[in-house]
Image: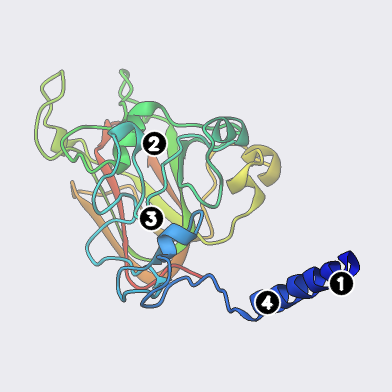
Amino acid sequence: MTALSNMRWLVLLLVSSSSVAAQTPSAWVVGGTSGEPWAAAAERWIALDDSVHAGAIQPRAIPLGHTVTRQLVRTGIATTQRNLFGYRWSLHKGPRQIEADTLEVGWHPRLWLGGGTNALAPEVMRGLVDGDELTASFAHRARADGRPNSAQFITLDLGVPVPVDSIVFFPPQTGLTSDNQRQRELFARAYEVSRTNVPVEWLIFEDETTSTGSSGYHPLDEIIASTFANNTSVVSLATDLRFTRFLRFKFGEVSTTTLLAEIEVFGRGYPQE
């Protein structure tokens, strides 16, 4: 057999081998009874659940009686407190520090005080979502002259819209302050709670004063409750079940101190798609 014939057989063998290889089925299977687990295949996800049925994935149901502000089982230290979906809370509204912390708006929940462009909350306020009901994490002190204090407001961005039908907040129910006042009696005499599901610019990054045209407190679209005559230490607000991403709490304009240990947000059903 000549060298040319040998080369022709080699080419024919390569073509034949390629045809056989092309006919061999190959696939990457995710889920099902024998596929790769969804959690392993996805780089990340939010508000999804693969534990209900083996190999299947579905939206994650909101557990009844468990606040969406924290995990069912904590997976990190208190300084990296995470929400129900496992994403770490940021205490910054603006993009500068969020990006520095490698967090993302629309994935990670946020909590901030006031309404400036780079509004933030002091580290102690992380305790409002950590499950510790015995420690005060927010204090709005009474004025020494007995006059009403200023209004202060806290905003929570839950990260994703969830169906909310109940909101609870309260001071520590045991213990005394440094001046021997019962902490449970330093509850919010005056408050206003509002919510929205609309991510307007000034709830994302923009300066609230510039965007709204006025400084100070602005309620969100729906006012859930408002009073200057509360006499209950543990405030529990039932409301219509509605998708909610942002919650705002206003306190103050009274002559008494307000303490908070926890803010809890409850719902039922599934996050908004």
Which class describes the residues within 10 Å of circle 3: few (<14), some (14-19), or many (20+)?
many
Dot 3 amino acid type: Phe
**Quarter of the image that includes the N terminus:** bottom right
Q: How is the image coloured?
A: rainbow
Task: Locate residue 240, reporting x and y percent.
Answer: 37, 72
Structural distance between the alpha carbons of marks 3 and 4: 43 Å
Dot 4 amino acid type: Ala
> For the view shown, which residue lies furthest in the bottom direction?
23
Foreground mark, 3 or 4? 4
* Residue in front for this viewpoint, 10 or 126: 10
Tag 3 residue = 85
Q: Which mark is residue 5?
A: 1
Foreground mark, 1 or 3? 1
Structural distance between the alpha carbons of marks 2 and 4: 75 Å
Say above or below: 49 vs 181.
Answer: below
Structural distance between the alpha carbons of marks 1 and 2: 98 Å
Which class describes the residues within 10 Å of circle 1: few (<14), some (14-19), or many (20+)?
few
Structural distance between the alpha carbons of marks 3 and 2: 35 Å
